[in-house]
Image: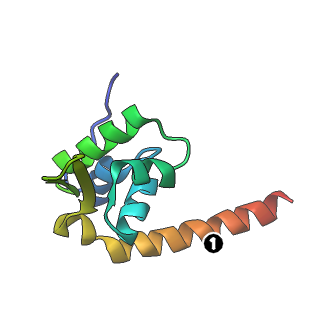
Amino acid sequence: MVRKQYAPDCGLHAALTVIGGKWKSAMLCELHLRPARFGERRRRVPGISEKVLFEQLRELGADGIVSRTVFDVVPPKVEYALTQTGAVPTHAVSTLAEWGRNHATLATAERR
């Protein structure tokens, strides 16, 4: 796969590289609500496979957006949450989500 080169000062591209994709936005919306275990994450993001969920959580963890906490209990308990870094763009993401909802409503109305 050939990747296009973008201007290094394009902050939007850098942000979307970390949080873009089919599943990450849905996962981040859910994590914004509250920390949760893996199984709950899977139920709250319909259509995602366990493999993809695990890979996406691992990528978000590597980017410092999501933390993984392992509790020393039997059976093992692992919880995922937004890190401080992951929580910083909350206002920007909320604004973008509102724009997306409005745009989707307008686009639907225009198609009719």
Query: From this viewpoint, which residue is outermost toward the top?
Result: 1
Q: Residue at x 80, y 66 (%)?
A: 109
* Viewer-side residue, 81 vs 111: 81
Query: From this viewpoint, which residue is outermost toward the front?
Result: 74
Q: Secondary structure at mark 1?
A: helix
Q: For mark 1, what is the residue?
A: 102
* Viewer-side residue, 101 vs 24: 24
Q: Residue at x 20, y 48 (%)?
A: 74
**Residue 83: x percent and y percent?**
19, 64
In the picture provided, is 33 more to the left or to the right than 106?
Answer: left
Q: Residue at x 29, y 46 (%)?
A: 57
Q: Looking at the figure, which quarter contains the N terminus? A: top left
101 versus 64 height, above or below:
below
| Mark 1 residue type | Asn
* Colouring scheme, one of rainbow, by chain, secondary structure, one colour: rainbow
Q: Can the viewer see residue 7 in this picture?
A: no
Q: Can the viewer see residue 107 in this picture?
A: yes
Q: Assess disc 1: are there few (<14), some (14-19) or many (≥20) residues with their C-alpha within 10 Å of its C-alpha.
A: few
* Viewer-side residue, 9 vs 69: 69
In the picture provided, is 63 more to the left or to the right than 91?
Answer: left
104 versus 45 height, above or below:
below
**Residue 65: x percent and y percent?**
23, 57
Query: From this viewpoint, which residue is outermost toward the left?
Result: 72
Q: Residue at x 18, y 69 (%)?
A: 84
Q: Looking at the figure, which quarter contains the C terminus? A: bottom right
Q: How many marks?
A: 1
Q: Quadrant of residue 34?
A: bottom left
